[in-house]
Image: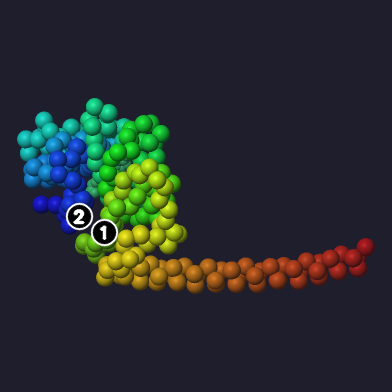
């Protein structure tokens, strides 16, 4: 039984996919998809030994070690061309980390550009969308959901030959999410507005203190110059 968050990701995986799940941890996602006979083959990549071991255990205990390769590797280094991967999922990490994994993978020719990317950043979605736009990806779908009081976004993207441009607002809110404006979206951005307002209040207060300090020092500098001039 997948979490609601991973189920949303799973629903975006096309039938018979050859999946690479990067940062797979327990390999819940590839195992669930394989048990439902929804995918053909999967690589579960992990960079940390503990999660790698638990991914191994999870596949073996389900009798799936023939169809899911668990590999200890950094990011997209887990993929080989012969795997013929056509879907990459990277979930449960910060958007900046996901972006860095994709960028490094691209530089090391681990991406053919034909894969569907299904990404679930916990924070920093904007930075991920900026990378996707710069690299010529089109955002095909987006979902926002709440589970255990946390709000998550899922972004589905594919590379296109023509360039796709998004406005600054679309990069921040998500081009699809900002049109849909569902209740979870409104909740997220109401919360974010409160945080922004509180930071702005703090910044305004400290800039006032800086201004006061500048005036005090300017005044005292004048007085010091006068007293020194008198003494010469
Ligand atoms: N993807 C699962 C999910 O969404 O439930 C697990 C998320 S878990 C919070 C993040 C996992 O990513 C950790 O197990 C961590 O070891 C792994 N990870 C972090 N950086 C990685 C990298 N560069 N390459 C592979 N795995 C990475």
Q: Tell me the number on the disc at residue 8.
A: 2
Relative image position of residue 60 (x, y in whole percent): 10, 35
Q: Nearer the viewer, residue 63 or 206?
A: 63
Q: Tell me the number on the disc at residue 118.
A: none
**Which corner quadrant of the figure contains ligand 1?**
top left
Q: Is residue 172 visible?
A: no
The residue at the far front in this view is: 162
Sequence order check, earlier mark of 1 and 2 = 2
Q: Relative to 70, does residue 14 appear above or below in the rendering?
A: below
Confirm or deny contact between disc 1 and disc 2 (CB under 8 A): yes
Relative image position of residue 131 (x, y in whole percent): 41, 47
Q: Nearer the viewer, residue 90 or 229?
A: 90
Q: Is residue 166 left or right of residue 29?
A: right
Relative image position of residue 24 (x, y in whole percent): 23, 42
Q: Identify the residue under disc 1.
A: 143
Q: Relative to 211, does residue 108 appear above or below in the rendering?
A: above
Q: Secondary structure at mark 2?
A: helix
Q: CA distance from mark 1 to mark 2?
A: 8 Å
Q: Please report the residue visible at 91 percent of the width from the left and 68 percent of the height from the top.
A: 230
Q: Quadrant of residue 59?
A: top left
């Amino acid at each position: 039984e997948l979490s609601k968050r991973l189920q949303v990701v799973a629903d975006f995986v096309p039938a018979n996919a050859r999946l690479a799940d990067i940062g797979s941890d327990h390999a819940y996602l590839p195992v669930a998809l394989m048990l439902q006979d929804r995918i053909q083959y999967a690589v579960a990549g992990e960079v940390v030994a503990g999660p790698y071991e638990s991914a191994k255990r999870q596949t073996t205990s389900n009798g799936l070690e023939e169809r899911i390769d668990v590999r200890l590797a950094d990011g997209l280094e887990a993929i080989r061309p012969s795997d013929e991967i056509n879907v990459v999922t990277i979930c449960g990490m910060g958007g900046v980390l996901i972006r860095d994994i994709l960028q490094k993978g691209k530089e090391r020719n681990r991406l053919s550009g034909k894969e569907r990317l299904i990404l679930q950043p916990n924070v920093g979605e904007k930075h991920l969308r900026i990378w996707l736009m710069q690299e010529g990806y089109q955002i095909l779908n987006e979902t926002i959901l709440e589970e255990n009081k946390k709000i998550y976004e899922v972004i589905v993207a594919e590379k296109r030959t023509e360039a796709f441009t998004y406005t600054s607002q679309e990069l921040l809110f998500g081009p699809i999410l900002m049109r849909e404006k569902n209740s979870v979206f409104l909740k997220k951005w109401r919360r974010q507005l409160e945080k922004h307002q509180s930071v702005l209040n703090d910044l305004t207060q400290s800039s006032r203190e800086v201004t006061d300090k500048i005036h005090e020092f300017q005044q005292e500098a004048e007085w010091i110059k006068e007293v020194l001039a008198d003494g010469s």
